Amino acid sequence: MTKTTEIKEIVTIPEGVSITIENKSVTIKGSKGDLTKYFSHPKIIITKKDGTLEVSCSDRPKRKEKALIGTYRAHLKNMIKGVTKGYTYTMKTVYSHFPIKTVVEGNEFIIHNFLGERSPRSATILENVIIAIKGDDVTVSGINKEKVGQTAANIERATKVKNRDIRVFQDGVYITNKGE
């Protein structure tokens, strides 16, 4: 059995997107904004070649390097999609016992009257994430997939039901769609 000496993954760069690579830091600029990410593995190299990004590892890659090449490619694709189209999660406020009121105050998402509680619950909104509330619908959007997803998860986690039967008390703010 012969071991492969080099593994490459290629990401195409669409029109209107500019990419700069300095040391191990990749900056991607598009119509919606710009994102920067640091890729730290010493053996994996990211290079820009005429309209494509090449993620490669020479020097007989092991299993972890092979897996990281795919991970880096996925991160780069997500960054390109974020600066061109953006990410939007839709959430729904669900209640049957006590009407829930949701408000955005600064970088906090506040949930009032959750299960009749007197003190409001709050979730952290990460930077560069926009939240729009229309009635019971909550829209979380931004260009960084990780931050948009984490903000939606923070909101969902803030409305976790404790010390009650979750089959009866199904109140909360839930992710309904992870669209574009």
Image (spheres, rainbow, N blue to C red):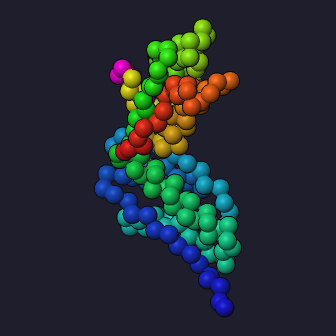
Residue 77 image offset from top left, x and y in percent: 45, 56
Q: 87 left or right of 162?
A: left
Question: Which of the 4 image quarters holds residue 24?
Answer: bottom right
Q: 112 left or right of 81?
A: right
Residue 119 vs 70, above or below: the answer is above
Q: Nearer the viewer, residue 51 or 157?
A: 157
Q: What number of labels is visible?
A: 0
- State the residue at coordinates (50%, 17%): 97
Check residue 132 for magenta coloring: yes
Query: On the rendered image, what quadrant is the N terminus found in?
Result: bottom right
Residue 45 image offset from top left, x and y in percent: 58, 65
Q: Nearer the viewer, residue 163 or 18?
A: 163
Residue 104 vs 85, above or below: the answer is above
Answer yes or no: is residue 142 visible: no
Q: Nearer the viewer, residue 161 or 96?
A: 96
Q: Give the magenta part as a residue range.
A: 130-135
Q: Nearer the viewer, residue 45 or 135?
A: 135
Magenta: main secondary structure equals strand
Q: 171 left or right of 13?
A: right
